[in-house]
Amino acid sequence: MSKRSGPWTLQSALGLSGSLVPINQLGPADQASVRRRNVSLVLGYLCEHGPASRAGVAAGTGLTKATVSNLMPDLLARGLVQESGKDQRTGAGRRGEQLRLAQGGIATIGVELNVGWIHVIGADLSGNVVYDAVVDHDNVHFGAESTIDVLGEATALALMTCRRDGLRVAGVTLAIPGSVDPASGVVRWSPYIDWHHVDLRAGLHARVEEMPPICWLDSTRNLALMAECWSGAARTAHDVVYLNGAVGVGAGVLVGRSVLRGTGGMGGEIGHIPLNPSGPRCGCGRHGCWETLVGMPALVRQAGLGAPWSEMVGRSRLSPVLDEIARRAEAEDKAVTAALEELGSWLGIGAAVVVNILNPELVVLGGYFGILARYLLPRALREMRRHVADPRQTRCRVVAGQVGLRAAAVGGAEIVRRAILADPSLLAGTPA
């Protein structure tokens, strides 16, 4: 098991977004490189610790106060940092101006493409959400071209709205349920929406005018994982499995703080572990995959909620369905209680397979698993402990996610935000 550490640094984020700033473009440690590193330290400190004085930033980063002061005019002029009033400390000496990451001015956008909807979130450099919209669309039956049309319209609307509000959009990240090649922008395979080798980045550029300098793609599971690592339940963990419960099931896997992608980007497709060969047919064409036993359609079906609720799961109406399930569970509805117990058992059995293989320090229940954790977690833990290879040696903790159902879109906006804070030259479209 890896050694625990503190919150994620901007350098870690930059490493994860490797194709945004290829390492061979960073160059030797000349004066510009040293300045870029110092800028990253300052912005990283403000990102993790919030507003601080110049003296506070210097003390927190190990830089001299003169170095921090020399950087400030440029950071203020470029809209990366703002002054936010006098330092509130008491005691002798003149109180300095508080510095914080800029609110407004620069924004990043995360777009999650799911089975029946598209979720778009925009955030400014301070992390404040400045745009949040959901578009219902059947992304399964209308084909890739129609879906990219709608995806382009949703992205263009977000860009137009942000720009109208005076925001400069620096980048867009697309979260796709399936196997993605981030470098080429190609969706290799998505069994959820039946896509094979779709050049999504090129398709989006062809449909959206004035795309920002950065257009990044990654899988839903990986971006949701990173959202939990940066601002959720896994901030200090090294080895994490994030289980994303939605219509399907995927896992973002972190090993030594590196995302496990696999040779063809299929790392984390654990929803297709065959747990019950005689079980329901899966979207991948096989029978009894784990997601057919623990996905939301299975829960709604076993709980006997009926067709209207099933149709809501296929669109962007997950929250009302989860509220109804929780309401019936609190009322001790027998069908719902039995369904939650059954699903919790399969969740624990599948989690045990993952724990036996990866031996993580932390399993985060994301998506709807996290929302209903109070009902699912006790049974899941019992089953997981029954099936792990040696429960006496297992130090793995299982916790509910904190970012919620929109984790992938949040992670999409966040990965570009942190990359920009690590290297603001990305705003010009070319790394320094």
Image: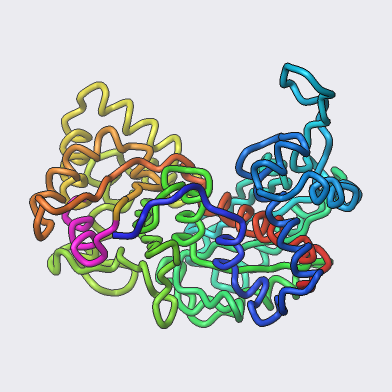
Q: Quadrant of residue 241?
A: bottom left
Q: Which residues are magenta?
A: 348-360
Q: Is residue 395 above or below residue 177?
A: above
Q: Residue at x 28, y 60 (%)?
A: 1
Q: Is residue 415 above or below residue 331?
A: below
Instruction: Give residue 284's position: percent from left, percent from top.
Output: 33, 72
- Colour scheme in the image? rainbow
SS assignment for the magenta stretch, majority = helix
Q: Residue at x 44, y 52 (%)?
A: 314
Q: Is residue 57 magenta?
A: no
Q: Quadrant of residue 271?
A: bottom left
Q: Is residue 292 above or below residue 306?
A: below
Q: Residue at x 75, y 65 (%)?
A: 34
Residue extending farthest front: 92
Left or right of 46, for residue 138 = left
Left or right of 37, for residue 362 = left
**Between residues 317 and 230, which one lies in front from this camera angle?**
230
**Between residues 190 and 397, which one lies in front from this camera angle?**
397
Left or right of 282, for residue 172 = right
Instruction: Give residue 301's position: percent from left, percent from top.
Output: 26, 47
Quadrant placement of the C terminus: bottom right
**Between residues 110 and 161, which one lies in front from this camera angle?**
110
Q: Residue at x 44, y 66 (%)?
A: 259
Instruction: Give residue 130's position: percent from left, percent from top.
Output: 72, 41
Instruction: Give residue 5's position: percent from left, percent from top.
Output: 43, 51
